[in-house]
Amino acid sequence: MGYYDYTPMDSPYEMSWPARDCNTCGSPELAWAYPVREVTFPRQISADGDVQTISHAAQPWFACDRCIGLINAGEWDRLAVMVGRPEGYFRKLAAARAPAAAYRWKHRKRLPR
């Protein structure tokens, strides 16, 4: 699979994958995008608990209205607990968040997988 530019006309940042859901809780109601520098994190990829390291570089992440308040406040551990993750789960993402402000995401429809 090659590179595809999924950047909508109203996005100030280049995108190489489409926004599908909130990157913290999984809600399909996307409302915000926020810039993140390069970040790697573990993702469980099987019911047996197999974990793969995922790397994202300089691409916005997405949040719903429920999560963006905690993200903006830097309450990452509170956010992790709220979405059923252990404290510290989002620390790498918190450290990688770019200093630019989040912006309203206008494309709220969930894309097919």
Image (cartoon, helix red, strand yellow):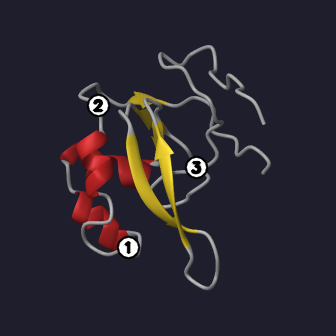
Of pointers 1 and 3, the one earlier in the residue sequence: 3
Q: Are marks 3 and 2 in contact (CB under 8 Å)?
A: no
Give amino acid for label 3. Glu
Residue at 23 percent across and 65 percent down: it is: 77
Of pointers 2 and 1, the one earlier in the residue sequence: 1
Q: Which residue lies most toward the bottom here?
A: 48
Distance of label 1 from label 3 (alpha carbons): 20 Å
Give amino acid for label 1. Arg
Above or below residue 83? Residue 91 is: above
Q: Secondary structure at mark 3?
A: loop
Residue at 45 percent across and 34 percent down: it is: 57
Q: Nearer the viewer, mark 3 or mark 2?
A: 2
Above or below residue 47? Residue 89 is: above
Q: Secondary structure at mark 2?
A: loop
Above or below residue 70? Residue 39 is: above
Displayed quadrant of residue 15:
top right
Identify residue for label 2: 98
Q: Nearer the viewer, residue 80 or 59?
A: 59
Q: Left or right: 76 with respect to 14?
A: left
Q: Position of residue 11 (x, y in %)?
A: 53, 19
Q: How many neighbours does mark 1 have within 10 angstroms: few (below 14), some (14-19), or many (20 or more)?
A: some
Q: How many neighbours does mark 3 have within 10 angstroms: few (below 14), some (14-19), or many (20 or more)?
A: some
Identify residue for label 3: 29
Identify residue for label 1: 85
Distance of label 3 from label 2 (alpha carbons): 23 Å
Residue at 38 percent across and 36 percent down: it is: 38
Displayed quadrant of residue 85:
bottom left
Q: Left or right: 60 with respect to 102?
A: right
Distance of label 2 from label 1 (alpha carbons): 23 Å
